[in-house]
């Protein structure tokens, strides 16, 4: 027999608890997975990935009859198998670097409905995007127009172009992840008229096919109001362009859709975001008399975060009377730097004793040589024992994407699970991976010359 897991809101959809109180994901017992693959271990639930991708596709296509593309924001985390799987669900991609383009090409997925973003695209990356047959390039700054134009003219191509605009909307996120304000490195300001001028310049170019405007306001955005405000600002620009005879056929309000990281978080679901976005855009199009454009949506974390669970093994404990108790695990800031850079909060689940009563408040620390290497501060847990497993849910986005080999730690194994089956989608690093890029012959010959 299995039971619904406590923390059901943040754990993957397929999570259950066995009679013995062990967490199961995708029908797999976490203890068995840890035995087979080792820890730290990242587990991706196929049911959650499928559900999230399908709900974004369905919510927007059912409410917007004028064309929809859902681009998974690869920056949340991508590798070859994940790219193939998400593509099979009907998603295309938002990419921001030559590296992301290369992974998708190696995955064999088509980039013809994907977009190339980035606030400082290099000439080589632009060439690579064009060579890969990228669906659109999203221009981030005025300087980029002439750069893309010259490369496109040299290569004899005419890429579809969107302009990323900065609408001056506060998305009320962490200051490091708010991107729609005037003081941001992202986008061309609407308020001072620069966005209008840039759109005119792009649409006048013989080497660019102007398609429309894009904005990404920040993330995670827990309400719909910023999207409503952003669309209203964008619609004014679409109207100004229409008055000059320039058609906006594509419009993107970006990504940033929130997920629950803790039991206190209550994010809207895909249908709620879709309703607010589609209704606002439809009513603005109607009011300002412009043709409803194709809608491009860029969810990243809302597709992959909840699908992922990080499994760690408990190690040492340090009690500082009247101050704090630290419990250290075998991962930390090398696989999850979000608490250190954003103060992000997580739930911590005693994965082998799901129904155990909390006995104490502890801070879960990583194993790295930084005081800031903390995964979760002041969490209520049963008294954890050495070698016991804990799970940190909502681990599927912006953790592996920002991982490092700090302290020359090995990057963890990543697996997928479904219906009691598990398989690796990225093997754990081995020590040889740490030195694979080292080049020794220069130093060796220097030493030899000195001998
Ligand atoms: C342009 C753009 N689109 C989409 C996203 C995805 O955001 P999220 O993963 O919060 O949905 C980002 C994130 O930084 C972004 O910069």
Image: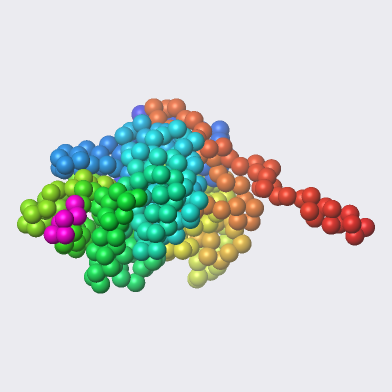
Q: Nearer the viewer, residue 443 or 292?
A: 292
Q: Nearer the viewer, residue 167 or 386?
A: 167
Q: Based on the picture, tell me whether residue 245 belongs to the magenta stretch.
A: yes
The residue lying at 34 percent from left, 42 percent from top is 135
**In screen coordinates, is 201 left or right of 81?**
left
The residue lying at 28 percent from left, 68 percent from top is 194
Q: Nearer the viewer, residue 10 or 268?
A: 268
Decide if residue 273 is in sight here. Answer: no
Write down the quadrant of residue 44 in the picture: top left
The residue lying at 57 percent from left, 61 percent from top is 318
Which colour style is shown?
rainbow
Write down the quadrant of residue 171 in the picture: bottom left
Q: Nearer the viewer, residue 276 or 98?
A: 98
**In screen coordinates, is 46 left or right of 70?**
right
Tell me the quadrant of the picture where the C terminus can be found. bottom right
Q: Position of residue 203 (x, y in %)?
A: 27, 55
Q: Position of residue 50 (x, y in %)?
A: 33, 35
Q: Based on the picture, tell me whether residue 292 belongs to the magenta stretch.
A: no
- Residues drawn in magenta: 242-247
């Amino acid at each position: 027999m299995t039971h619904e897991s406590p923390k059901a809101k943040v754990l993957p959809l397929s999570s259950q608890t066995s009679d013995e109180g062990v967490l199961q994901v995708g029908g797999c017992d976490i203890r068995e997975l840890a035995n087979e693959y080792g820890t730290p271990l990242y587990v991706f639930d196929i049911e959650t990935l499928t559900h999230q991708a399908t709900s974004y596709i369905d919510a927007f296509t059912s409410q917007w009859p004028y064309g929809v593309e859902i681009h998974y924001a690869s920056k949340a985390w991508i590798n070859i198998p994940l790219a193939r799987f998400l593509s099979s669900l009907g998603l295309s991609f938002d990419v921001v670097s030559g590296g992301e383009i290369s992974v998708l090409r190696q995955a064999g997925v088509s980039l013809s409905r994907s977009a190339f973003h980035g606030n400082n695209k290099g000439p080589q990356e632009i060439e690579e995007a064009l060579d890969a047959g990228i669906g659109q390039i999203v221009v981030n700054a005025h300087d980029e127009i002439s750069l893309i134009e010259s490369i496109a003219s040299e290569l004899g191509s005419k890429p579809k172009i969107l302009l990323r605009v900065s609408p001056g909307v506060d998305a009320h996120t962490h200051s490091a992840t708010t991107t729609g304000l005037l003081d941001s490195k992202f986008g061309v300001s609407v308020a001072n008229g620069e966005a209008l001028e840039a759109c005119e310049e792009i649409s006048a170019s013989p080497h660019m096919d102007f398609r429309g405007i894009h904005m990404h306001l920040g993330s995670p955005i827990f309400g719909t109001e910023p999207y409503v405000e952003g669309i209203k600002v964008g619609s004014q620009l679409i109207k100004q362009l229409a008055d000059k005879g320039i058609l906006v056929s594509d419009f993107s309000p970006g990504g940033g859709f929130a997920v629950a990281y803790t039991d206190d978080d209550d994010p809207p679901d895909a249908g709620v975001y879709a309703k607010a976005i589609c209704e606002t855009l439809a009513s603005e199009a109607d009011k300002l008399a412009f043709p409803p454009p194709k809608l491009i949506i860029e969810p990243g974390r809302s597709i992959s975060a909840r699908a992922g669970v990080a499994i760690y093994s408990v190690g040492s404990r340090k009690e500082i009377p009247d101050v704090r108790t630290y419990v250290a695990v075998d991962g930390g800031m090398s696989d999850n730097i979000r608490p250190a850079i954003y103060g992000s909060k997580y739930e911590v689940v005693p994965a082998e004793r799901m129904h155990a009563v909390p006995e104490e408040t502890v801070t879960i620390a990583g194993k790295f040589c930084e005081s800031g290497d903390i995964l979760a501060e002041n969490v209520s847990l049963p008294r954890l024992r050495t070698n016991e497993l804990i799970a940190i849910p909502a681990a599927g986005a912006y953790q592996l994407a920002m991982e490092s080999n700090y302290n020359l730690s090995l990057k963890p194994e990543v697996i997928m699970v479904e219906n009691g089956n598990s398989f690796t989608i990225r093997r754990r690093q081995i020590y040889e991976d740490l030195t694979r890029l080292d080049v020794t012959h220069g130093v060796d010959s220097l030493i030899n010359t000195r001998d």
